[in-house]
Amino acid sequence: MAGIQILRTHLTLTVTVPLEQLRREMGEPVLAIGPTLAGEVDQYVREHKLGYYPALDYFIQKQALDMDLVAAAEHVAAMVAETARRKIQTRLREPFSNIKFANIQSVAMTLPRVRPGDANALNSLTQHYSPNRIRIGVIASSIEKAGINTEDYNKLAAHKMRNWLEPEFESVDITESHQMDAAD
């Protein structure tokens, strides 16, 4: 009788919910969050000659932005995160035996990867601050036959995850994957 083994893979992915879906579910104002935040942040950074775009927490602590706008962004981001979590949990029931979430964070709340001197800075900031992108750490478990070659299994897990999630999201980017030891 062949045995089984449980293989666990930690994956970090960024999923994008279509803005059009958010507009249908939450209304037109949700489309203005990214461009408005980007404009206010860009104006502040240029006026204060910071040389980089800090994360939103910096502006929140300084109360340098419209706090109602920030609250709206946080609210929409939380709703998007919960929606993404549910969709991921539901979609991955079949290809994986168990799914656990290590962390969930809105990309809008992270440090932008754009500089004020970039030619397309305002457009890049708009995309960054739109609350429809979520970064998620997922631990996916699979039941496999004992003795199979597990080298590079993380690549197979990433491939399965991408294939099962792509129909649900505008984009699915897997930035990290590694197989976990039994002790992890």
Image: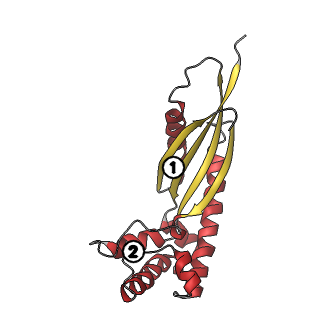
Colour scheme used in the picture?
A: secondary structure
Q: Where 145 sits versus 116, above or below?
A: above
State the residue at coordinates (63%, 60%). 83
* Residue 174 percent coordinates (x, y): 49, 47
Location of the C terminus by quadrant is top right
User: Is residue 178 in view from this perspective?
Assistant: yes
Check disc 2: other Cα within 10 Å, few if <14, some if 14-19, many if 20+: some
The quarter of the picture where residue 94 lies is: top right
User: Is residue 64 found left or right of 146 in the rendered image?
Assistant: left
Q: Looking at the picture, how far across and down is residue 29, in whole percent?
A: 53, 81
Q: Which amino acid, by three-letter code, is at mark 1?
A: Pro
Secondary structure category for the residue under label 1? helix
Name the front one of labels 1 and 2. 2
| Residue bearing the label numbered 2 | 52
Residue at point 73%, 10% (across, down): 1
Q: Residue furthest left?
A: 119
* Earlier sequence position, callout 1 versus callout 2: 2
All told, the count of numbered labels is: 2
113 w.r.t. 87: above or below: below
Using the image as rendered, state which of residue 60 and residue 84 is in the foreground: 60
The residue identified by callout 1 is 167
Where is 119 relative to 139, above or below? below
Residue type, mark 2 in image? Tyr
Q: Are marks 1 and 2 in contact (CB under 8 Å)?
A: no
| Rendering coords of residue 111 (x, y %) | 48, 68
Q: Look at 62% across and 62% down and name the residue there.
A: 81
